[in-house]
Amino acid sequence: MAHDHAHAHGHSHGHAHDHSHDHSPIEGSSEKKLLLAFVLTLVMLVVEAGGGLVSGSLALLADAGHMLVDALALLLAFLGARFAARPADAQRTYGYGRIEVLAGFVNALTQFALVAFIIYEAVQRLFHPEPILSGIMFVVALVGLVANVVVLRTLHGHDPDDVNIAGASLHVLGDLLGSVAAVLAALAVYFMGWLWADPALSILVSLLILRSAWSLVRRSGHILLEGTPDGVHLDEVTKVLHECDPAILDIHHVHVWQMTAGSRMATLHAELAPGADQARVLTAIKTTLSERWQVGHATVQFDPGECPDELEGCGQDGGRHSH
């Protein structure tokens, strides 16, 4: 639905959006996946911690420590998905969807602390090797590997923009790599007597986790800073919108950002020719934004000639882009 609000300062805002933000089908599915992943991870945490203590394997203890952080991360992700489904209110007019992004950001940060701990312990073991019961280590690591595959498949298929599920999946992937390392280390200790394989493979897995964690921090941080979504270039947006209706004389002050997974928003100013049909132009702009860049919520301000924001000295967000 489109409508115009006339204002005393001589321009109008065209709005066409829906504040309902219905999350129920997606969030409900996410909640179930995350809850199941949390329970399975919690069970394997106990199994690997016990196995690590009995066998003396750092790889198993490191993986158990990783699973402890992961269990908390999955719980945080579950709560994030639950709160994100809450409807908008007077204080949170866009709803609580950003909690999912915040949860993903925090989950990624915890990985840095975990990696630092594992590397520190591994270095100590490299200089001071300790005996390992490779048989127990192998069995426990193999069970953990199977459990992590099940959990990862449970979380598979999420929206690529859902950094909350992505954060949870990153933790589980770290667990999976940790289990693989523990299996390989157990085999190396049993057949070759290489006690150093246990801490060495723990360090390798930690470095792989670190790379993925940094990627997630950048993605979620970019969303929290309201950065332009991937695949959206403001110069291209400005040019295409300028050409979407002959009555548009100028497009400027264009902003496109992402609230949460699959929720893109935009604001912009448009200068129209005298007597232009604002409803028609508004529909053209919103249709173009939706079909080409998946923007579901757009606010368009129509300027009567010179942009009032520039006259008031507020035009610090990109200026005008005439074509």
Image (tube, rainbow, N blue to C red):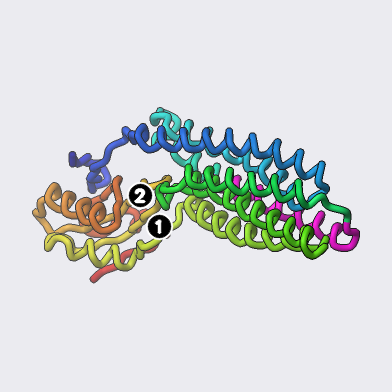
Q: 191 or 176, which is in the foreground?
A: 191
Label 1 vs 2, first from the N-terminus: 1
Residue 113 colored in magenta in the image: yes
- Quadrant containing the N terminus is top left
Badge number at residue 201: none
Q: What residue type is labelled 1?
A: Pro
**To which residue does mark 2 refer?**
264
For label 2, the crowd category at 10 Å Cα-Cα, with few meaning under 14, some 14 to 19 and many 20 or more, is many
Q: 70 or 18, which is in the foreground?
A: 70
Write down the region rendered in magenta: 104-129
For label 1, the crowd category at 10 Å Cα-Cα, with few meaning under 14, some 14 to 19 and many 20 or more, is some
Residue 26's x, y, as percent?
Answer: 37, 38
In-image side of 312 versus 144 (left or right): left
**To which residue does mark 1 refer?**
229
In-image side of 251 versus 256 (left or right): left
Residue at (69, 46) in percent of width and height: 139
- Quadrant containing the C terminus is bottom left
CB atoms at circles 1 and 2 under 8 Å apart? yes
Q: Which amino acid does label 2 sit on?
A: Arg
Q: Can residue 151 be seen in this view?
A: yes
Q: 141 or 16, which is in the foreground?
A: 141
Residue found at the far bottom of this picture: 323
